[in-house]
Image (cartoon, helix red, strand yellow):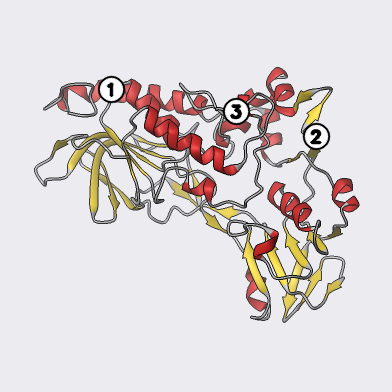
């Protein structure tokens, strides 16, 4: 996919000056791009990967969404799968690619943002050797940024094979023999269940999450969540604050994994050589393979705008920061439980689009030089 050749007019230094830059080209960034295109704004989407959907395509082979296809659409284009089916990772990646192409969204590939700074007229984003200047910026890099591995992993013997869930692909890619899976979220449960079909698996869980069935009374879980209004509960409400403190494991449960032969262990507290120790003082010896399903941590070190990130977390209200013109999209519980989900991120994208349009209209008299056509292609 090629981006438009003239997304903005030149400033005196020669860089392109745009109405907006979207950082991140997965579902959140593409939903935002659709709205910006509808407004006729000049913008680019900076995607760090070599193709749209790269992050999805690089997940483990058997990954399935726990949202059925009818809840997986971005604005303007249905997900191409029957209702009540659960897409795997490659169809999701294909959908994102087709979506960007269908709406001719100006995605720049291999364009990882390495710095974001303020300028007199807005912001500057550095991506490789290219600088992008814009009045407004949306950071849509999502919640899954840097894989987290506990420090105790360094105490394991070098002969122990260690893989984070971000790099896990399938059982065949691991050496034969028992596996210790660490992490009790959806990824940990799914990977442990898959591995248990061919080997002994221990699953270490630090936090016990509520477990919800995928279907009840003939309806998918998300039908119920939508019908009951739970996906509209906001994070600043009392029930939203309570819900946001805990995640859920969806579509499986402890009993099902125990039937598959998975041995449950409490929190992992220490490691030495090829032996690990759990919170109940139990030991597991001769560990050969560890899969760390221990989640991700945000990385905002490249954002050099004071007051935006505090103690590693974005300071915002529904994605709107205290810095005029700077927004975030796709964060976990940014506004509701659906804020970071493929089929629900559009609500927040539409909200930010209104804020961006309002600010653009305020600034428009000063930035209309050289506009023509549909506002993107010059």
Instruction: Please give the name of the residue rendered at 49% of the width and 33% of the height, measured from the top-left corner.
Output: 317
Label 3: how many Cα within 10 Å (few below 14, some 14–19, many 20+): some
Q: Between disc 2 and disc 3, whose residue precedes?
A: 3
Left or right: residue 244 versus residue 219 is left
| Separation of marks 2 and 3 at Cα, in angstroms | 22 Å
For label 1, the crowd category at 10 Å Cα-Cα, with few meaning under 14, some 14 to 19 and many 20 or more, is some
Asked if residue 263 is positioned above or below residue 344 in the image, the reply reads below
Circle 1 sits on which residue? 40
The mark closer to the camera, 3 or 1, is: 3
Q: Which mark is residue 213?
A: 2
Residue reaching furthest to the left? 12
124 versus 271 height, above or below: above
For residue 76, which numbered disc appears in the image? Answer: none
Of tags 2 and 3, the one toward the viewer is 3
Q: Position of residue 345 (x, y in %)?
A: 52, 30
User: In what element is the residue under mark 3?
Assistant: loop
Q: Residue at x 60, y 31 (%)?
A: 338
- Residue 326 lies in what quarter of the image? top left
- Crowding at mark 2 (Cα within 10 Å: few <14, some 14-19, many 20+): few
Say whether residue 329 is visible: no
What is the CA distance from the residue labelled 3 to the residue labelled 1? 30 Å
| Left or right, residue 139 beside residue 4 | right
- Residue 81: image tag: 3
Vertical comparison of 307 with 321: above or below: below
């Amino acid at each position: 996919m090629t981006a438009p050749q003239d997304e903005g007019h030149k400033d005196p230094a020669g860089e392109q000056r745009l109405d907006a830059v979207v950082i991140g080209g997965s579902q959140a960034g593409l939903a935002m791009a659709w709205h910006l295109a509808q407004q006729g704004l000049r913008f680019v989407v900076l995607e760090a990967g070599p193709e749209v959907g790269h992050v999805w395509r690089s997940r483990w082979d058997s990954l399935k969404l726990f949202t059925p296809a009818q809840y997986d659409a971005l604005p303007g284009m249905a997900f191409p799968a029957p209702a009540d089916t659960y897409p795997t990772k490659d169809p999701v990646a294909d959908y994102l690619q087709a979506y960007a192409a269908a709406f001719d969204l100006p995605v720049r590939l291999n364009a990882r943002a390495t710095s974001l700074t303020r300028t007199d007229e807005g912001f500057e984003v550095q991506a490789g050797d290219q600088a992008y200047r814009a009045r407004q910026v949306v950071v849509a890099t999502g919640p899954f940024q840097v894989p987290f591995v506990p420090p105790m992993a360094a105490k394991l013997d070098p002969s122990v094979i260690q893989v984070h869930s971000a790099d896990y692909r399938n059982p065949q890619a691991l050496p034969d023999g028992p596996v210790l899976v660490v992490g009790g979220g959806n990824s940990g449960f799914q990977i442990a269940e898959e591995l248990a079909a061919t080997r002994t698996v221990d699953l270490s869980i630090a936090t016990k999450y509520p477990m919800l069935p995928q279907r009840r009374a003939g309806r998918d879980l998300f039908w119920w969540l939508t019908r009951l209004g739970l996906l509209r509960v906001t994070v600043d409400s009392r029930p939203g604050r309570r819900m946001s403190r805990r995640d859920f494991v969806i579509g499986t449960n402890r009993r099902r994994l125990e039937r598959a032969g998975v041995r449950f262990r409490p929190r992992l507290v220490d490691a030495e050589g090829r032996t690990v120790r759990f919170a109940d003082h139990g030991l597991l010896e001769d560990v050969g393979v560890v899969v760390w399903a221990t989640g991700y941590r945000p990385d905002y070190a490249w954002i050099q705008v004071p007051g935006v990130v505090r103690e590693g977390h974005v300071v915002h209200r529904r994605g709107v920061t205290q810095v005029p013109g700077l927004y975030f999209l796709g964060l976990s519980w940014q506004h509701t439980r659906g804020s970071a989900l493929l089929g629900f991120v559009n609500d927040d994208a539409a909200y930010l689009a209104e804020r961006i349009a309002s600010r653009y209209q305020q600034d428009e008299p000063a930035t209309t030089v050289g506009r023509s056509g549909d506002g993107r292609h010059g």
